[in-house]
Image (spheres, rainbow, N blue to C red):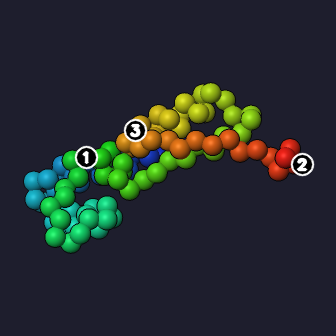
């Protein structure tokens, strides 16, 4: 997934989080709590989109022997942008295991 595909929705979430922090939309706050796995009586309010995404999204870079350092770096940048660690593994062709 390209970073641009993630950045635009995150900007929208930031706007909602900022508005919700002022109590303008209790339904969005309730949805964020539910998605984040918070109990119904929780006082949790996301501080920003990165913090919320860091609680609900995961990243995994599945490189191959042909993957470049640039591709791996992009995966790391994306993970950092959403507040997550990147899990990394090397995928090996089954034909090469024999």
Label 1 to label 2, Cα distance in Å? 49 Å
What residue is drawn where x is 31% and y is 52%?
A: 52
Q: Earlier in the sequence, mark 3 or mark 1?
A: 1
Q: Mark 1 packing: few (<14 Cα in 10 Å), some, or many (20+)? A: some
Most foreground residue, 9 or 74 = 74
Question: Where does the image place residue 20, in percent across and percent down from the top left?
Answer: 16, 56
Number of labelled discs?
A: 3
Q: Earlier in the sequence, mark 1 or mark 2?
A: 1
Residue behind mark 2: 98
Determine whether 91 is above or below 76 in the image: below
**What residue is drawn where x is 14% and y is 53%?**
21
Q: Which residue is mark 1?
A: 48
> Which residue is at the far top?
69
Q: In the rendering, at what x and y percent does residue 4 appear?
A: 46, 41
- Circles 2 and 3: CB atoms closer than 8 Å: no
Instruction: Judge the density around disc 3: few (<14), some (14-19), many (≥20) Cα neighbours within 10 Å.
Output: some
């Amino acid at each position: 997934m390209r970073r641009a595909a993630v950045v635009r929705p995150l900007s929208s979430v930031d706007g909602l989080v900022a508005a919700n922090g002022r109590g303008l939309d209790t339904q969005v706050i309730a949805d964020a709590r539910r998605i984040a796995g918070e109990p119904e009586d929780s006082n949790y309010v996301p501080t920003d989109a990165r913090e919320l995404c860091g609680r609900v999204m995961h990243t995994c870079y599945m490189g191959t022997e042909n993957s470049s350092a640039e591709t791996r770096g992009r995966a790391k940048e994306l993970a950092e942008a959403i507040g997550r660690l990147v899990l990394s593994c090397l995928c090996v062709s089954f034909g090469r295991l024999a």
